Amino acid sequence: MSSVLLSEPARDPRVQAGTFNVLIVGGGSAGISVAARLIAAKVRSVAIVEPSTEHYYQPLWTLVGGGAVRPEESRRAESSLVPKGCTWIRDAVASFDPDANRVMLASGGVVNYNYLVVCPGIQVDFDRVDGLTDVIGTNGVSSNYTYELAPKTFQMLDAVTGGTLLFTMPAGAIKCAGAPQKIMYLAADLMRKKKIKARVVFASASPAIFGVKAFQEPLMKVVRRYGIETLFNHNLVAVDGARKVAIFEKTDDPAKPRVEIPYAFMHVTPPQSAPDFVKHSPLAETTGPQKGYVKIDPATMRSTFYPDVFALGDAGSSPNSKTGAAIRKQAPVVVENMLAAMHGSPLKATYDGYASCPIVTGYGKLILAEFDYDGKPTPSIPIIDLKKERWSMFMLKRRFLPWMYWNLMLRGRA
Ligand code: FAD
């Protein structure tokens, strides 16, 4: 791996105006997985544009918020993950010029490419809820959706002595649609263990507990066991931090009446959207629920506008559940199809929408939801009924999946 910090005064002019065979935008779960596979396939001249010196395994943030894992376990130096033979351009992409096969960098540099892979993840928009940025991280309001806040979730939960514990889920696509409720089950279990009487409320902009029908009843069973109150079609629009009151809009009523709920603790899942520089680019889908995300064919992962552009992960428009598990299946498809494109062959590899969401239902309990584009359950181990809560599946999330991520997936071996 060679690293170039383009914003340094003495920058390498060959890289500043460099040309790469494959340029990858974003060195997160998707970018590193694709880079590792391209290098293994002996593709030359591969570069990643990634501004951050740290890489995060975000699925562990649920357990960080539940006090079961130290935050540092989810973090590694980006330099240790960029594969040997791949150039790391330490900068951010500011805009795309796909008609000229180039990207513009935040530092002012320009990088040309033959093939482009776009995977800068999804944007968390805390500022789309009035008053939230003033209060988040203080006064009983936290979120597992950032590395800095996830440990505060547990500090705040551990300090609760009663009252209402409120868990929100926004409208629109988010990463890991199960995460808003996983932390709620851990919190409910914590209260049970500590014998603290608390009201637990799930207020969600969605009409049901989970988008995939097969897992709704097993999850509602868990909800009933903990005595959790559910408020569906409730979208968080504002927070009054001084009064400790959350304000929701009812999404199933055309009058959009507002409902106020006081809280002792609130876990907010922020609204999310495509990164601004993707939304405002010629690569973006322009209509419908995928508006703003990189418009790709959901099977081949290739841009429907530009044949030398591919996208995957949270930034892509494929209508799968946005998870690392989906990326594990998408990365080989992107690489195989890009190699085919390089050889002028038809694109044969297809992605079926597989995603998996390990839904933690308590300390030591987990339902592993695996499904495809059609919401059809697609269990990796067909003989086990994954709709049942299991300790073995909790250990899979706590121990096996992080090991698999660092050692196999990011090395292009799984
Ligand atoms: P990321 O991994 O977020 O990487 C995007 C990268 O792009 C980042 O490194 C960023 O710095 C970089 N970038 C951003 N802007 C630019 C720019 N302008 N130029 C260049 N680079 C840029 N998934 C599961 O499979 N199972 C789970 O149990 C699970 N639980 C989760 C729980 C929580 C609380 C959260 C937050 C997520 C969870 N996920 C889970 C989702 C999973 O982490 C994401 O789907 C996955 O990380 C997305 O990978 P990505 O590469 O698309 O984006």
Image: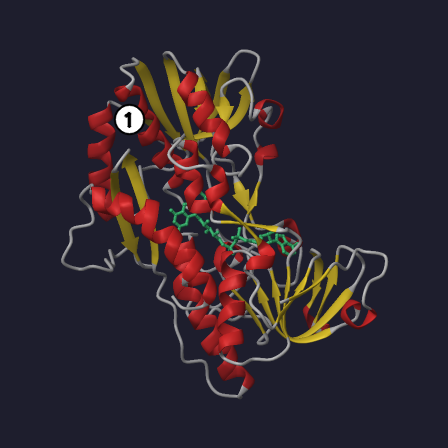
Image position, residue 275 (x, y; %)? 61, 50
Is residue 229 in view? Answer: no
Closer to the camera in the image, 105 or 71: 71
| Residue drawn at (41%, 22%) of the image | 157
Image position, residue 118 (x, y; %)? 58, 63
Left or right: where does residue 147 sit relative to residue 104?
left
Q: Is mark 1 within 8 Å of ligand 1?
A: no
Is residue 99 in view? Answer: yes
Residue 86, relative to residue 140: is it above or below? below
Residue 27, relative to residue 100: is it above or below? above
| Residue drawn at (21%, 27%) of the image | 224
Quadrant that contains the N terminus: bottom right
| Residue drawn at (31%, 37%) of the image | 209
Q: Give the mark count.
A: 1
Colouring of the image: secondary structure
Residue furthest left in the image: 383
Left or right: where does residue 41 sit relative to residue 54?
left
* Residue bearing mark 1: 189
Image position, residue 365 (x, y; %)? 24, 38
Residue 127, relative to residue 52: is it above or below? above
Amino acid type, label 1: Asp
Under circle 1, the secondary element is helix
Closer to the camera in the image, 302 or 359: 359
The image quarter in which residue 44 lies: bottom right
Quadrant that contains the C terminus: bottom left
Residue furthest right in the image: 9
| Residue drawn at (58%, 26%) of the image | 132
The image quarter in which residue 14 lies: bottom right
